[in-house]
Amino acid sequence: MNIIFLDTEATGLQDARMIQLAYKMRGSDELFTQYYKPPVPIEFEAMGIHHITQKMVDDKIPFDQSPDKPALQELLNTSILVAHNAAFDIEVLKTEGIATKDYICTYKVAYALYDLPNHKMQSLRYRWSIEIDQAVAHDAAGDVMVLEEVFEYMLKDYCATNGVSPEEAIQKFIEISTQPTLLKTLSFGKLRGETFEDIRIKDFGYLQWLGTLTDKDDDFVYTIQHYLKKGPSGN
């Protein structure tokens, strides 16, 4: 199985365009990283996260004009993409005209396998004592280095815990990544931090109201529908 660890930094969250790309093939020592001039301005909120300013990329070639674009597409045609919060990176790639096939989201895998207060990649890095001195958070190249180690930790742990081969574990990771995630707790509103099961029992009407929200992702919709089907307390 060809596996490519990948991370992007972008202009923002909505209609995001790529300003940095980093990737590494599993089993290779070579780490690719490059900056690009985007066709839209970088949002200040995004700069506050990845610290890439407009001045840093104004003299770079646009990704669409770069030979890196067809080279990346060729790799993705025959590789499993691994990314943390893969939906974002896949959407950025799609906007840039890059198609992905099989993928693994290490965030969704970690969420499914480990009952932790936080499943962000940098939190997992320190929780699992992943030491990479040169890995800078929110830099695509640094994130790829951490991403690879997080993936390898979960792969080894899953194989040992379940007595399966790495190939079987990878297929399970793909399955987890491509299916909706059953969320555990509500992340906003008056009942923020409450489990959806407790909300179902204590305030089924509020759960029904949550089901009317139209600006939520597939995981949220799937979770609400799951608990609504269970009915109010006592059912």
Image: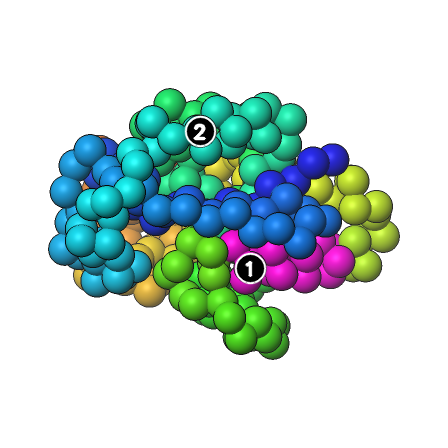
Asked if residue 153 is among those painted magenta in the image, a careful observer would answer yes
From this viewpoint, is residue 47 visible?
yes
**Label 2, label 1: how many angstroms apart (C-alpha)?**
23 Å
Q: Secondary structure at mark 1?
A: helix
Q: Secondary structure at mark 2?
A: loop
| Residue drawn 41% across the image and 66% down it | 137
From this viewpoint, is residue 231 visible?
no
x then y, percent, for residue 3: 65, 40
So how many labels did they put on this image?
Answer: 2
The circle on residue 185 is none
Point out the stretch of residues depicted in magenta: 144-158
| Left or right of 61 in this view: 83 | right
> Which residue is at the far front?
59
Say which label, 2 or 1, has the lower sequence index.
Answer: 2
Label 1 neighbourhood size at 10 Å, few (<14), some (14-19), many (20+)? many
The residue that label 1 is drawn on is 145
The residue that label 2 is drawn on is 67
x then y, percent, for residue 182: 48, 45
Asked if residue 138 is among those painted magenta in the image, a careful observer would answer no
Q: Is residue 28 above or below residue 90?
A: below
**Pointer 2 with pointer 1, Cβ within 8 A:** no
